[in-house]
């Protein structure tokens, strides 16, 4: 079974702190994603990566950066946390199938509260 | 501007009946469509998908229909069961760039 593991289930951080959210997948997937989930807005894509050291902006990259130094690990960084970044953060990974797209597998989520 | 839209935030259905969840998209470059199911405090889990070259895909009680000309897809669950109660997200993908809708909360009443 594919396993996508997010380092924390719950985090509480102070405004202005630098926050690291870590995600590791064990299936050698090429693609990794960071989403945030907010009520009424669904899952919004922050960043995705299709290869080591490669990244693409999603719909809401402002205030975030990412790092992918190794294939299995994709980190989301909040440079200076703000209260409007309080949310559920979801990491996902997928592979490149023969026809191109395949389903993404999700981690359990990190609920971040910025106070 | 959301490229994938689920206009019904909630749906309530009686056990044994059909549940129909709808999804619309705006980007004609999307070529792969998926449905995910999410329980509270868990990550979404993949349910069923369909490629843009098909108009129907079936897996047990779940069937997804795609109408490319209308940029519309739907998920049918027959018969609905109480365990199907969850939030359902529609997703659309182009070159592995995957976008999601806002979700529909399905409640199946015994």
Image (spheres, coloured by chain):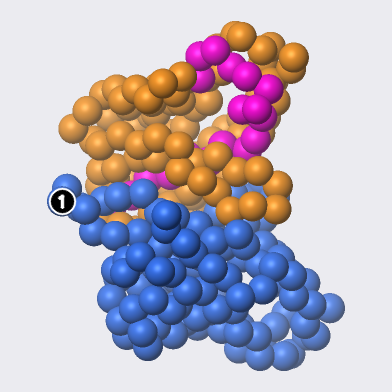
Chain colours: A blue, B orange
Quadrant location of the C terminus of chain B?
top right
Magenta-tinted stretch: B77-94
Which residue in the protein does label 1 denote? A98
Q: Height in image: A17 above or below A7?
A: below
Residue A61 visible to the viewer: no
Residue at the image position 65 percent from the left and 85 percent from the top: A19
Residue B27, by quadrant, is top left
Q: Height in image: B10 above or below B99?
A: above
Magenta span contains residue B86: yes
Nearest the viewer among A93 and B74 is: A93
Is residue B2 found left or right of A57 in the rendered image?
Answer: right
Residue A71 visible to the viewer: yes
Magenta span contains residue A32: no
Is label 1 in a helix, a strand or a loop? loop
Q: Height in image: A59 above or below B26?
A: below
Question: Hey, which residue is sitting farthest top in the picture?
Answer: B17
Residue at the image position 21 percent from the left and 53 percent from the top: A97
Chain letter of disc 1 in the image: A
Report x, y in % for residue B60. Answer: 41, 21
Residue at the image position 59 percent from the left and 17 percent from the top: B80
Residue at the image position 37 percent from the left and 88 percent from the top: A69
Residue A104, by quadrant, is bottom left
Question: Hey, which residue is sitting farthest front in the picture?
Answer: A1
Is residue B109 found left or right of B26 in the rendered image?
Answer: right
Report x, y in % for residue A113. Answer: 77, 72
Report x, y in % for residue A22. Answer: 55, 78
Nearest the viewer among A90 and B74 is: A90
């Amino acid at each position: 079974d594919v396993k996508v593991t997010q380092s924390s289930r719950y985090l509480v951080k102070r405004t202005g702190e630098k926050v690291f959210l870590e995600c590791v997948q064990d299936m050698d997937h090429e693609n990794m994603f960071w989403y945030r989930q907010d009520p009424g807005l669904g899952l919004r894509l922050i960043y995705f990566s299709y290869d080591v050291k490669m990244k693409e902006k999603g719909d809401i990259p402002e205030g975030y950066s990412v790092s992918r130094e190794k294939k299995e690990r994709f980190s989301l960084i909040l440079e200076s946390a703000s209260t409007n970044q309080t949310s559920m953060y979801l990491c996902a990974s997928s592979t490149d199938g023969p026809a191109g797209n395949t389903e993404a597998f999700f981690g359990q989520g990190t609920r971040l509260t910025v106070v | 501007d959301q490229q994938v839209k689920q206009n019904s935030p909630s749906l309530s259905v009686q056990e044994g009946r059909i549940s129909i969840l709808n999804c619309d998209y705006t980007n004609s470059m999307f070529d792969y469509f998926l449905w995910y199911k999410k329980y509270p405090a868990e990550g979404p889990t993949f349910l069923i998908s369909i490629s843009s070259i098909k108009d129907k895909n079936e897996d047990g009680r779940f069937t997804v229909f795609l109408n490319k000309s209308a940029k519309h897809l739907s998920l049918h669950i027959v018969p609905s069961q109480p365990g199907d109660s969850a939030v359902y997200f529609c997703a659309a993908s182009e070159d592995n760039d995957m976008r999601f809708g806002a979700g529909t909360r399905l409640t199946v009443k015994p």
